[in-house]
Image: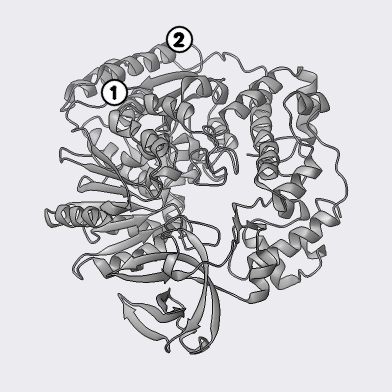
Amino acid sequence: MELNADIINIKGIGEKTAANYRRIGINTVGDLVMHIPRGYEEYKEIEAVKDAPLDCNIIVEGVLAKRPAVKSIRGRKIVSAPLNDRGTVLNLVWFNMPFLANSLKVGTYYILRGKITVKNGEKRMVHPKILTKEEYYNRLHKLIPIYNLTEGLTNNSLMKSEAYAIENLKPIKDYIPDNIRKKYNIMPFMPAVKKIHFPNNREEVNEARKRFVFDEFFTFLLMLRHYKKGSAKIKSERKYTHFEVCEKLIDSLPYELTKAQQTVYNEVIADIKSGYVMNRLIQGDVGSGKTIIAALALLLNAKNGYQGALMVPTEVLAKQHYESFVKLLEGFDVRITLLTGSMSVYAKQKEYEKIRENKTDIIIGTHALIQEKVVYADLGLVITDEQHRFGVNQRKNISDKGNCCHTIVMSATPIPRTLAIILYGDMDISVINELPKARLPIKNCVVGQSYRNAAYSFILKEINKGNKAYIICPMIEESEGSELSDVNSYYVKLSEIMPDNINIDILHGKMKPSEKNKVMERFKCGMTDILISTTVIEVGIDVPEATVMMIENAERFGLAQLHQLRGRVGRSDRQSYCIFMTADERKEVLERLEVLNRSNDGFYIAGQDLKLRGPGDMFGVRQSGEAYFDIADIYNDADVLKNADAAVRSLSDEEVSRIVRVCPRKGKYTEIVPVFAL
């Protein structure tokens, strides 16, 4: 089979199943074979409930002792039943699966996989997976790939499809030159595909993964070089004279700019005065004051007769910036527009007209700003916030809306300078490395599972003071092969613990944008006390009343990402706290997390991350680059990134052009494309 063949050609995939695959972006055989497992599970011997370890995935067996009971907690159906294993009782609990009450039979022998915990002195297993004997013995001591799925697809069916596709795949000529593969010890494509899906051991997994990590870095840097070719310094035709308006805004602020803010502001002004097009990256911790620099630049741009655009990744963030800019620039006679995807067609048309006819000065919005229907009168400055959420093409598309317009990209991701130079080699880099003086330092603690009840009591105490709390879980839902806490299970568990008057909500990336907006608005306006979330909260809203963050499985995150998450609290003059809860209390794990206790400097922490974070769980929690890379992580894979950079630099312009014509799209061998669409 060819890589670009439709998945309908794979044995066992009909129209209905094909539609399910297409929902998660799998349209071709190439898409399927590049649907890399997110992890692996290894089925071990059955353990006795009496001696089984807690809080890790294990296999147990036993006989159902009583008929399942069904109860409702906060509107969710909970099924529970006791399992007897040689005299030891294990309480089984499932949520949102009421049909199990009828299918589970008293006196029947069951094999189950899950995590044992203890509640009120009783052992229990929440949401265990029920296995047949055949399933268990077929998987015993094997590495089983675990895939991201959607409704209508099972892990078993996807495994069968992968096996068929790989077995019948037509051999492919590798697009990476042989000399580069040999120099950096990169596995050829065909063997890597087979080993990433069906490895014999962990060494084969890591070897195959290295190939696809190199792929992502290599193609990204290749296209970056391709875009940069011939675009050194470009002359700017725009003239800026009214600089006094910026000083007027600075004087009107209720605080003084920090030295770091003043330095970066001066760098931006120098760029604009230089006569060349500005192309600058501004890095700064969450809360370091990047937004005021953006406001100053956009105000200057507007007062000199040009339009400016601020693009952010979420509608909630767009609305938040719009409201703060309207308030901040009141009295400066500046027209500000909000443009998001969820606006009605009529509302969008009105804003399109304003933009086209130069009846607005600053346009704030999401990716809606780069839609074809948006025509700018004279776009002089483009700023993208939380820029790591946007791909190269998205950033380029909005810049192309103006004729050689100035560009600023802002990031709260603390990337060490050595890596930033590789990833943003075409940009001048500014760093805001200090926080406003009024901010109280966040108090941190790194704790094990024994501190859990004390942590819940502390959270309740803060809520009773009128504050709010975040709880961060790595996963959305309970999943095979994962020891990580998940949002849905956590909601059930916390609902049983917290008093009925405490309002709890959940937030995760699989929600529709409109649902996420509603959840975040409820939290912001005081309807929710505790928000259980995945890391989507990283670029969320500012909630001054949020004073506590507890991060589950903190050992599975990178230090830089933990630091970013922690930045969601401490957004006011209230004392804030961050609790790093770890399930792994080995000395080296605790020492690594202690870095967060010692420093609030994101760039120091990022540097320590590179030193202290070893290979770890290569398929654990993603730390960075959600928009750039599917598999690679710039911290875990820093050495591979440096090798890919050296490989691209070693190529001639002619070789770059030739490889660009045949390289895969975002690491996927699905089509031959002349332009890389990241």
Q: Residue furthest left?
A: 465
Toward which corner of the image does residue 530 lie, by quadrant? bottom left
| Residue labelled with disc 1 | 434
| Residue at image location 24% in from the left, 65% down from the top | 503
Toward which corner of the image does residue 383 lie, by quadrant? top left
Of residue 14 and residue 504, the one placed in the foreground of this image is 504
Q: How many marks?
A: 2
Give x and y (percent) for residue 277: 51, 17
Q: Quadrant of the N terminus?
A: bottom right
Check disc 1: other Cα within 10 Å, few if <14, some if 14-19, many if 20+. some
Q: Secondary structure at mark 1?
A: loop
Residue 80, relative to residue 647: is it above or below? below
Residue 559, relative to residue 135: is it above or below? above
Mark 2 vs 1: CB contact within 8 A? no
Give x and y (percent) for residue 448: 32, 48
Q: Quadrant of the C terminus?
A: top right
Between discs 2 and 1, the one toward the N terminus: 2
Give residue 221's mark: none
Which amino acid lies under the numbered mark 2 shown in the image of this protein? Ser
Q: CA distance from mark 2 to mark 1?
A: 27 Å
Which amino acid lies under the numbered mark 1 shown in the image of this protein? Glu
Determine whether, in the image, residue 450 is placed left or right of residue 280: left
Residue 193, relative to residue 174: is it above or below? below
Of residue 188 and residue 396, the one placed in the foreground of this image is 188
| Residue at image location 38% in from the left, 79% down from the top | 77
Give x and y (percent) for residue 300: 34, 22
Q: Secondary structure at mark 2?
A: loop
Give residue 274's mark: 2
Determine whether, in the image, residue 635 is placed left or right of residue 591: right
Give x and y (percent) for residue 191: 79, 44
Check disc 2: other Cα within 10 Å, few if <14, some if 14-19, many if 20+. few
Of residue 541 and residue 549, the one placed in the foreground of this image is 549
